[in-house]
């Protein structure tokens, strides 16, 4: 399913860059499979594609069907891992233009992932008088952005459908046992889905967190899980021939050799938000204790005409990871009898042939410019290939965090801005901090 | 119009970081205003908001009206500077959801900015049987991506409207005197607009390159130019109190102090593609000779829950530039009698108050984490403020490139991938290179 080419990394690293890390990789893989080591309590994602809750999975599919029947719009309320996974998969599998397409599944809008007044007002106008449902996703129910959005859309639903009608249109994905949203969902009788304790937000796309919106968009979540299951089986074997081990070793070697930025590149525009999901996965897992590769992304060939100059000749601080999907369709380049643009040497060739050579030519140009290149090749964009890639990136991320000797599954730094924000907002209990901060503004 | 706050940069730099660069800034400003020094022949953008072609500007507005009357869809074909400026301004001023809105201006789709077969096929399906026009933007007419796209959409127009009908729906923005597209446009009688010689692609958004699509979207291009004109007048004065000088000095000082990444952050989601435009502007201007800040971007508060961990505690290689717009509308946070989420201390407050405190709290948290912070505050998103910001970023970029002692207006590295691609595609004349490259694949 996935072909990893590290031949354009080798010139930049010692020949034994994988084998010299074998002991550490063995230990990392063992920690992941035994749910031990730093953050071991958050490694439920490792076995998820096999051990997921089958009863809940069936309920997700039923809820998706009900949403499709009842509503022209689904508002998905969540932030961070409760936002990016679903958006990434929906844009990649159903297109960034999903909402513009004629279809028998609802438009999907994401809310509660920011604090922009104008974006909120625009979203309310876009929904207009259409029928809508809400999937609110929050483990605690108290995170500011989604909580504020849920107050607003819950009130809109109750205004439009009455208290009882609203209850039948709200789907709460939250903690299994405790928390503000869990309590409310129990009291109101919302249909509930679970944010598992053992799966952190950035690893949660294949739980109900991601799967309900994904299924509502008409995506085959069985096939998605099947792709992930295949990856789980293939990668758990480990060993120096294993692509996950090899990629983790290459990333770690390049980082130690002074490459501080990993640039994820793809030639398919729908990959844009998948790259955003990937940035959270890696940035939040590795970016701690003053360490970690800075994750950035580009869309090729568009960005060869914007960031291309920097990649070719700027600071030599990066390596590139290219994700290449086979095309689904075919388009033959038409001939121009006048050959105005001088491109008749391409007439009759598939556009994908041009894309392929652009990629190969770019990799060689960047390598010549001092940018090591990892190439990940996959079949066409589809549920199985995307499910595989999700698990591959997750597993490599777990290995990478352990190689870096950080806890790959915590995120202590995310609290810093929240604490300051609460203080400045005048939340009771933060009076001292408020006074301190205001003196610095 | 624009307020620059560098108080959260000062702790990271020597006190005299502006004045110590005054002589260099004076020289840089003088090179820009006199169109001299490295790349001086490409500094037509400096006086553009005053000296633009008024006759062409009127034709742009007339053409936009004609497109609005004739077509439900405008396909804009271009790549790099012939793509990002228009998309950036349309998304920022008319929303990333522009095509989803009910409106009396056409949907706008961008084509010719990549080589994805599936995205091309999807675009053709999205246009469907609707009436459409094409704005093809290319100085030469031979750049592969837009040239291939133009072959395809020109043939579609001729099929649908006949040769003559197609001619009345194609708008060519190209070189004033020479080139493949200029020759074709003359022969066919397309309405023509000019890519000026003295304005490089990444600086071309306020020429016909950007203005025709922007005007077609119903945006007031007089007000946009007016904002840029104000910036031109205010910034050309120079001096150590000038925000452009100060920001350029801060960027250069931070770069010399080891900050290799500039992270552009905004709290408004429609800013996403404006940040992409900014990346090309700075990455392509500064990223050469092994130098230059790596430009990256985040959308807050969403990405505080993804990249936030890295920014707070990862490698200390970055500084942050935050762009803050005032909100246009207002939204009051509703009260919840049960206070389920514990947020009733916010009830009755405007959402923008929460956003403001989130921003202030985040800046302080990031500064405490060792990330210097530049704050740019503007009035609400509108033609004048966006026009001002465009010119501000352009002018600072020109100064910055000169401070870095590179030619800020060339892009020699962009050719490397093209040469390889042509060779691998079998373009006549590249036979030797083809053989060499294929041996390395």
Image: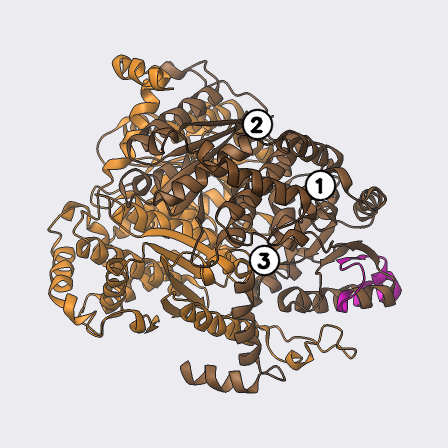
Chain colours: A brown, B orange
x, y (%) of residue B263?
39, 57
Q: Is residue B215 visible?
A: no
Label 1 sits on residue: A47
Q: Are marks 3 and 1 in contact (CB under 8 Å)?
A: no
Label 2 sits on residue: A2
Q: Secondary structure at mark 3?
A: loop
Task: State the residue lying farthest toward the front.
Answer: A23
Would you call the spot at circle 3 few (<14 residues within 10 Å), some (14-19), or many (20 or more)?
Answer: some
Out of B384 and A221, give the one closest to the viewer.
A221
Label 3 sits on residue: A410
A110 is within the stretch colored magenta: no
In the image, residue A213 sits, relative to residue A299, either above or below, namely: below
x, y (%) of residue B397?
26, 55
Determine the chain carrying the residue at label 1: A
Both labels 3 and 2 in a single chain = yes
How far separated are the C-alphas under marks 1 and 2?
19 Å
Q: Which residues are magenta?
A: A158-181
Task: Return the disc, 3 or 2, that comes first in the chain's sequence.
Answer: 2
Determine the chain carrying the residue at label 3: A
How far separated are the C-alphas under marks 3 and 2?
28 Å
In the image, residue A300 sits, relative to residue A71, either above or below, namely: above
How far separated are the C-alphas under marks 3 and 1?
19 Å
Task: Return the disc, 1 or 2, that comes first in the chain's sequence.
Answer: 2
A172 is within the stretch colored magenta: yes
């Amino acid at each position: 399913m996935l072909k990893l080419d590290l031949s354009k990394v080798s010139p930049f690293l010692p020949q034994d860059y994988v084998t010299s890390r074998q002991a550490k990789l063995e230990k990392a893989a063992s920690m992941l499979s035994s749910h031990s080591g730093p953050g071991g309590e958050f490694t439920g994602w490792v076995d998820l594609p096999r051990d997921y809750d089958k009863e809940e999975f069936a309920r997700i599919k039923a809820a998706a069907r009900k949403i499709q029947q009842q509503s022209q719009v689904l508002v998905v309320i969540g932030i961070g891992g409760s936002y990016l996974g679903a958006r990434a998969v929906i844009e990649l599998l159903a297109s960034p233009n999903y909402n513009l397409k004629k279809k028998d599944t609802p438009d999907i809008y994401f809310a509660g992932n920011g604090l922009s007044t104008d974006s909120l007002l625009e979203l309310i106008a876009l929904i207009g008088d259409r029928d809508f449902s809400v999937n609110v996703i929050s483990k605690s129910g108290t995170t500011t952005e989604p909580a504020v959005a849920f107050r607003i859309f819950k009130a809109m639903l109750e205004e439009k459908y009455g208290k009882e009608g609203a209850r039948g249109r709200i789907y709460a994905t939250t903690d299994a046992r405790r928390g503000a949203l869990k309590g409310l969902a129990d009291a109101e009788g919302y249909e509930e889905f679970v944010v598992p304790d053992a799966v952190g937000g950035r690893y949660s796309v294949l739980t109900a967190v991601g799967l309900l919106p994904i299924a509502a968009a008409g995506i085959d979540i069985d096939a998605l899980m099947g792709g992930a299951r295949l990856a789980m089986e293939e990668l758990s074997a480990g060993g120096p021939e294993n692509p996950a081990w090899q990629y983790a070793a290459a990333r770690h070697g390049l980082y130690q050799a002074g490459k501080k930025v990993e640039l994820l590149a793809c030639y398919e525009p729908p990959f844009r938000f998948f790259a955003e999901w990937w940035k959270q996965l890696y940035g939040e897992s590795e970016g701690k204790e003053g360490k970690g590769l800075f994750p950035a992304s580009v869309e090729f060939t568009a960005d060869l005409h914007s960031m291309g100059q920097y990649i070719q000749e700027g600071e030599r601080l990066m390596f590139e990871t290219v994700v290449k999907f086979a095309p689904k369709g075919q388009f033959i380049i038409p001939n121009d009898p006048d050959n105005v643009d001088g491109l008749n040497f391409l007439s009759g060739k598939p556009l994908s042939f041009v894309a392929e050579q652009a990629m190969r030519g770019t990799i060689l140009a960047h390598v010549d410019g001092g940018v090591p290149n990892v190439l990940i090749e996959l079949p066409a964009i589809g549920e199985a290939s995307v499910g595989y890639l999700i698990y591959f990136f997750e597993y490599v991320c777990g290995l990478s965090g352990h190689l870096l000797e950080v806890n790959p599954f915590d995120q202590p730094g995310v609290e810093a801005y929240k604490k300051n924000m609460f203080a400045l907002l005048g939340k009771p209990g933060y009076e001292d901090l408020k006074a301190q901060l205001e003196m610095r503004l």
